[in-house]
Image: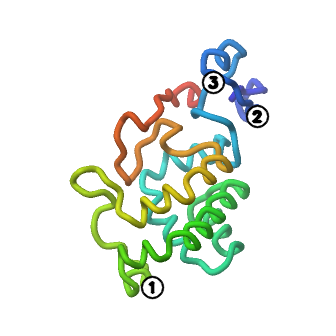
Amino acid sequence: MRFTDEHRSSYQLRDFDTGPTAVAAGFTVTHQGRCGSCSTLRDLAIYLSTPDLTSPARECARKAGLKRKKQCFQKRIGFTAYCAESWAYNALNTRRECLGACLADYGFFNLLFGRYPGPNVDESGQLRPCLQCDENRSGAGFKYSAGRTRRNSGLQSAIKRPGSEIFTVDHSAYFQ
């Protein structure tokens, strides 16, 4: 990311092979990997200000149809339109690919009424089966579409992850 005006209100996004290459070109690294639909600073601000996206994302994922899911991700959470669309497609794919695992994990009535009892990870750090299915079946597609994720932006989430999975990023550079 590189600001393109003196007021620091407009900026340019660009992919680089390495962080040092980005810095040498006058850019600031805001996340690891390629840019995508969630690479905007507005979407980063949502990630920074909302430590627990799991709960509101589950609420939006329960909405019927892509359009309602996307609207929820925009209005309820505040994502940009393109980022909200990536989240909505991720929710659709997870439902298609992981419904059986999630029913077995949480139970029919809990899913029906939007209840997700218990921790997201067990004592050994393993994800619940439903979340692991989402990670396995939808994770790569979401990362490709979104570009920015919490982990590749250096942010911990409500789902605790090992520090080795969190990319180191200094976000103070664009909040001066």
Looking at the picture, tell me which residue is in the foreground, 110 or 78: 110
Q: Position of residue 105 (x, y in %)?
A: 36, 73
Mark nearest the camera among 3 and 2 is: 3
Instruction: State which tag comes first along the sequence, 3 or 1.
Output: 3
Q: What is the CA distance from the residue labelled 3 to the residue labelled 1?
A: 44 Å
Q: Residues within 10 Å of mark 3 (few under 14, many from 20)?
A: many
Marks 1 & 2, CB-CB < 8 Å contact: no
Name the residue at 71% across, 73% down.
Answer: 67
Q: Residues within 10 Å of mark 2 (few under 14, many from 20)?
A: few
Mark nearest the camera among 1 and 2 is: 1
Question: Which disc is residue 112 wearing?
Answer: 1
Left or right of 52: which side holds 77?
right
Question: Which disc is residue 28 wearing?
Answer: 3
Question: In the displayed structure, would residue 14 be above or below residue 118?
Answer: above
Q: Position of residue 70 (x, y in %)?
A: 67, 67
Marks 3 & 1, CB-CB < 8 Å contact: no
Name the residue at 38% across, 54% down.
Answer: 158
Q: Residue type at mark 3?
A: Thr
Question: Which disc is residue 10 wearing?
Answer: 2
